[in-house]
Image (cartoon, rainbow, N blue to C red):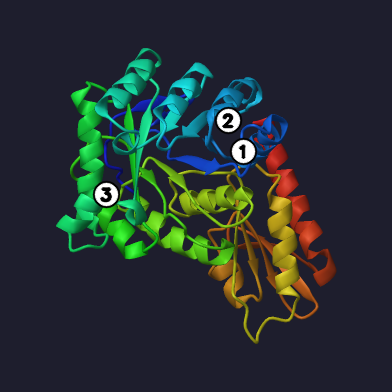
Amino acid sequence: MIERKPTKGIQVGTVHIGDNAPVSIQSMITTNPVKVEQSIEEINRLATAGCELVRLAVPDMAAAKAIKDIKERAMIPLIADIHFDYRLALQAIDSGIDGLRINPGNIGSIDNVIKVVEKAKPKLIPIRIGVNAGSLPQHVLDAHGGHPTADGMVDTALEHIRILESLEYDQIKVSIKATDVPLMIEAYRKLSSKIPYPLHLGLTEAGTIKQGTIKSAIGIGTLLADGIGDTIRVSLTGDPIHEVEVAKTILSSLELRTFGATMISCPTCGRCQVNLFNMADIVEERLKSIKDPIRVAVMGCVVNGPGEAREADFGIAGGKGQGIIFRKGKVLKTVPEQELVDTLFAEIDQYLLTLEDN
């Protein structure tokens, strides 16, 4: 059981973050908000996949004004990603935004920051301070040997936090991202020990779906296992739906969240005499519609079947042209290979009906 670090609770729209709330899943749309219909479609597709918060790039005033129309039909809370021009943050608040991602240090004078905070205060709109290793201020780089370090990233985050605290604003969450996994882990660990605010975990520029998934699972997963982190985004070069799927898998693998049925399967070997790859793909796809938290095993032979997978609620173990269906290590029946998947789901469906009756 992972013991999570206590953090201050904040509210982003309908989503509670910190204060031991469930670790929430974020993503970011690829559409400019001025394309209202396309933005709404992408947001709601992400929401249906399990995304709970979504960020929008706000490059100009037209995009900031478009948030109003998007907000009316979006299924989940919206966060505006603002850089350099504080007036975009002001307009985003007027348009009904639920949260801001902004660095107080890069929107000009302290007067600009004051204007944003004064506008956000009445609605308690949280501000995420987003520090990236690749864009640290020059004075921080100079103080830390001319290149990004964990200490330099933490110093930058603390500078920005102090600006908001000086204005008596504590609706804050913080991210401190890097492309390098060890650097990201070190920076978050150090920052976590210094502040009470909730942390948004992620790797920046993690890479393509395959590479980014692995890097994010290591970086985000390591911190979550330490009890660090209140909301996450898996940044991938690809359809953002993949970000949500990977985030759900990371959280469920650590038993921090449950998202319906999960599957375990063996890597196969020379003992396998069934088409395990195809069978596993079919089972995984069919399990997506099941919302109950059951575990299903797809195993290549009896060695890895009811024995090693005895904790699975249901499972398949292949044989020569046939296989067994088992539940919690107990063999239920033997059926031909071509009937294994359908028979498995018949047993699962019958079990789910008993849950509904109860």
Look at the numbered discs 2 and 1 and tell me whether their residues touch, using CB distance below 8 Å.
Answer: yes
Which residue in the protein does label 1 denote? 32
The x and y percentages for residue 352 are 69, 41
Judged from this view, the residue extending furthest toward the top is 122
User: Mark 2: which secondary structure?
Assistant: helix
Which residue in the protein does label 2 denote? 63
Nearest the eye: 88 or 55: 88
Residue drawn at x 63%, y 26% as measured from the top left: 70
The quarter of the displayed image where residue 351 is located: top right
Look at the numbered discs 2 and 3 and tell me whether their residues touch, using CB distance below 8 Å.
Answer: no
* Inter-mark Cα distance, 2 to 3: 27 Å
The quarter of the displayed image where residue 122 is located: top left
Q: Which mark is residue 137?
A: 3
Type of amino acid at the residue the image marks with label 1: Asn
* Inter-mark Cα distance, 2 to 1: 7 Å
Please say whether residue 189 is visible from this viewpoint: no
Nearest the eye: 62 or 190: 62
What crowding class fits label 3: few (fewer than 14 Cα within 10 Å), some (14-19), or many (20 or more)? some
- Is residue 227 positioned above or below 320 on the image? above
The x and y percentages for residue 101 are 41, 35
